[in-house]
Amino acid sequence: MRVIMLAPPGAGKGTQGERIAARYAVPHISSGEIFRDEVTRQTPLGKQLSGYLERGDLVPDDLVLRLIRDRVVAAAEQSGGYVLDGFPRTLEQAEAAAGIGRETNTSAQAVVYLDAAADVLIGRLTGRAENRADDSEAVARHRLEVYAEHTQPLVDYYSARGILVKIDAAAPVDVVSEQIFAALDRVKRR
Ligand code: AP5
């Protein structure tokens, strides 16, 4: 199973991405987690990333690809699948992901688009138990604006390619999972 999660901050990419990965036994690759790990370990790349993450701005595409590309290729080649959570997030990244898919014959089979209203998303982000540094209301609102400008256009991009699966992410976690699994099981049977 090869899945891309496409959703605004707080919609449940991480929560549902883990569940999809467990159900279909494929690696869960979260760009945000990879970046936060670099920042925590204070690596040279982490020092370049920290400002973007703190502000809620997108990390530049070239830097994203340096950190993500090899992991996607390895996951696709070693386990035949992946759940990409947080990547791609711009049209340039989507084109890069499509290129990786073509080169390794592992193009995404489905893009799970989790949709929920902004007030629901802000409530989840500001109330998150882990209390992430970028979850203050001001930064959360900025992340939603960044999403609307740079990532929302990917909904049309993947819809035009016939692989978009839209899910109501305002529903309870288990209901969202059931809807996703039902849709992905149909994709798998094709
Ligand atoms: P990233 O880590 O990807 O953060 P995000 O997109 O802002 O998403 P979140 O992790 O906040 O939310 P989520 O959708 O995963 O929801 P979650 O399951 O956690 O990116 C962080 C930063 O890294 C970016 O701002 C950017 O700077 C950089 N970055 C990352 N990738 C990049 C890229 N490709 N290009 C450039 N820059 C990049 O759930 C949120 C909360 O809601 C949790 O508390 C959860 O328990 C709860 N919840 C989830 N589902 C439900 C539900 N159905 N009902 C009730 N509560 C729920």
Image (tube, rainbow, N blue to C red):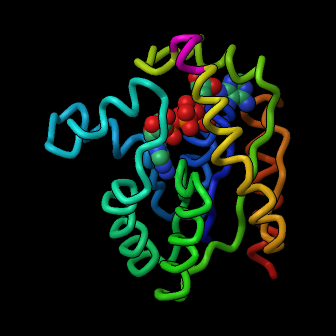
Task: Report the magenta stretch's main SS.
Answer: helix
**Relative side of 119 to 11, left or right:** right
> In the picture, residue 189 is in which quadrant?
bottom right
Ligand 1 shows up in the quarter that is top right
Q: Is residue 120 above or below residue 44?
A: above
x then y, percent, for residue 70: 33, 69
What is the quadrant of the N terminus in the image?
A: bottom right
| Looking at the image, residue 68 lies above or below residue 42 | below
Left or right: where does residue 100 sit relative to residue 8?
left
The answer to whether residue 146 is left or right of residue 148 is left
Tell me which corner region of the image, top left, top right, bottom left or bottom right, holds residue 102.
Answer: bottom right
Assess whether residue 107 is covered by the magenta stretch.
no
At horizontal 37% and vertical 59% (from top left) the residue drawn is 62
Position of the C terminus, as image quadrant, is: bottom right
| Residue located at (60% from left, 79% from top) | 107
- Which residue occupies 56% across, 57% down? 88
Residues shaded magenta: 136-140
